[in-house]
Amino acid sequence: MRFNRFAAAALLAVPALAAAQDAAEHTLSVGVLAGGTFPTGRLSRQLYDPGYQIGALAQAWTPLRWLGVRVDGSYRRTSLGRQQIVDQQGIPHGTVSVDVSFRTLAASVVARAPGLRSPLQPYALAGYGTYGLRGEVTHSDDPTLAPNGRGDFRYVHGAHVGLGVDAPVGRARAFVETRYEHVGPSLRFMPVDVGVRLR
């Protein structure tokens, strides 16, 4: 009799545990990420050197469980390298080094494999974002271009697609992901990030 009561209680607890797990999946989670960014495409590779980024995100899964939404923002820094300064006659007057900082804010739809029961969860994402770009002179041989001179932020829009995988680490989930970004009319970047998301 005592065994039957225990078995009945266990059976009744299974749906409650499943509901609690689903509720946890649907709650908002926040996280941080960091990594490198790499220019792709002929023009971007000619203009930019590889750089780095740090950022934060907020993510939630919908009642479909395999479909979620994410909002993330990041600070990114890269460089145009050392450029030669020439006048209107093409005569060189020295060199200048320019770093470029990005402020990014993006929204994405995140999808993972429906019904996959595995600690490792691959996922795909796609979305749209705003990118604020600003140049900063870090070195100059030309007295008319002083170091630490900064321009204004110029905002452009872009789309991205990406792939990643995450896994549980204690009460959090660690992830690795990469994206392909089409920024403005002609720039292409591929950031690669590692991060952790509190669930």
Image (spheres, rainbow, N blue to C red):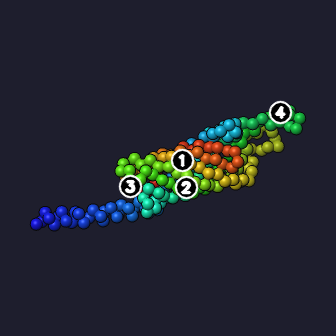
Name the residue type under label 4: Pro
Residues marked 2 and 4 touching at CB (< 8 Å) = no
Q: Position of residue 34 (x, y in %)?
A: 53, 47
Which residue bears the numbered disc 4?
92
Q: CA distance from mark 2 to mark 3?
A: 24 Å
Q: Quadrant of residue 93?
A: top right
Q: Position of residue 145 (x, y in %)?
A: 79, 43
Tell me if residue 57 comes above or below residue 82 in the rendering.
below
Name the residue type under label 2: Ser
Instruction: Kindly report which numbered mark, 4 or 3, lies closer to the viewer in this rendering.
Output: 3
Rendered image: mark on residue 108: 2
Element type at mark 4: strand
Q: Quadrant of residue 10?
A: bottom left
Element type at mark 1: strand
Which residue bears the numbered disc 3?
171
Rendered image: mark on residue 162: 1
Q: Position of residue 124 (x, y in %)?
A: 50, 49
